[in-house]
């Protein structure tokens, strides 16, 4: 297995015409269906990069920006944005095209963390990334920042000395009433 691979080596794009069977009760394409497709492309992209079976470890930032209509052509583009020792962050961009007008809209961007596994289910090392342009470098750096932020948040709220008392002033501008039982 090569020690490093370019991002282009594992870049993937899929397109699918949205059918009435994919819609929700509001007549738009169901978000769960789109998430299912995103998970499939993340798996394919990560597996192509690592040359192994991969599993989804987490999904970060799923914002549905624009609804997808029945009859639109959805295209998903995926690339490995970051690699750790055994994990990869796959960035996915979802676009929908009205095939009669040619109008394309950005519907979603998301980041799936995938982990490479061997036949016994143990995590295995993945090739590093060769970054070829400034956009790829930005994506790599943004992934690092998301990982660091997640770790800091976990450390802050999962620590033994956590006390909600430290956050009461922070909560004042929010629509919440604290009614915790006495200890």
Image (tube, rainbow, N blue to C red):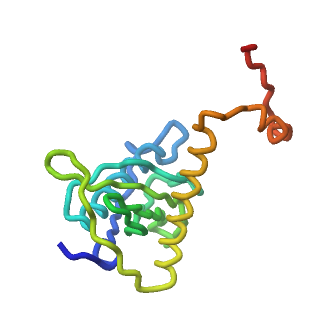
Q: Nearer the viewer, residue 2 or 34?
A: 2
- Indicate the position of residue 33 as horizontal and vertical percent values: 40, 46
Q: Nearer the viewer, residue 54 or 141?
A: 141
- Indicate the position of residue 78 as horizontal and vertical percent values: 38, 66
Is residue 21 positioned above or below 110 on the image? above
Q: Residue at x 47, y 48 (%)?
A: 29
Farthest residue to the bottom: give it. Answer: 133
- Indicate the position of residue 88 as horizontal and vertical percent values: 37, 61
Is residue 24 positioned above or below 122 on the image? above
- Indicate the position of residue 127 as horizontal and vertical percent values: 27, 70
Total numbered labels placed on residues in the image: 0
Farthest residue to the front: give it. Answer: 161
In the rendered view, does 127 fall on the left or right side of 73?
Answer: left
**On the rendered image, what quadrant is the C terminus found in?**
top right
Q: Residue at x 30, y 56 (%)?
A: 43
In the rendered view, does 81 fall on the left or right side of 171?
Answer: left
**On the rendered image, what quadrant is the N terminus found in?**
bottom left
Is residue 68 positioned above or below 102 on the image? above
Q: Residue at x 48, y 64 (%)?
A: 95
Q: Nearer the viewer, residue 4 or 89?
A: 4
Q: Nearer the viewer, residue 163 or 177?
A: 163
């Amino acid at each position: 297995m090569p020690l490093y691979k370019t991002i282009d080596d594992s870049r993937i794009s899929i397109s699918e015409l949205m059918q009435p069977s994919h819609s929700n009760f509001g007549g738009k394409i169901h978000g769960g269906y789109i998430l299912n497709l995103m998970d499939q492309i993340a798996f394919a992209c990560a597996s192509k990069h690592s040359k192994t079976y991969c599993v989804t470890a987490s999904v970060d930032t799923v914002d549905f920006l624009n609804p997808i209509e029945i009859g639109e052509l959805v295209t998903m583009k995926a690339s490995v944005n970051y690699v750790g020792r055994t994990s990869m962050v796959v960035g996915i961009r979802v676009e929908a095209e009205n095939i009669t007008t040619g109008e394309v809209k950005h519907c979603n961007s998301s980041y799936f963390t995938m982990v490479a596994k061997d036949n016994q289910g143990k995590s295995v090392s993945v090739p590093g990334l060769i970054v070829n342009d400034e956009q790829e470098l930005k994506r790599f750096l943004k992934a690092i920042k998301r990982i660091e932020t997640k770790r800091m948040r976990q450390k802050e709220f999962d620590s033994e000395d956590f006390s909600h008392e430290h956050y009461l002033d922070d909560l004042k501008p929010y629509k919440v009433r604290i009614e915790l039982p006495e200890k």
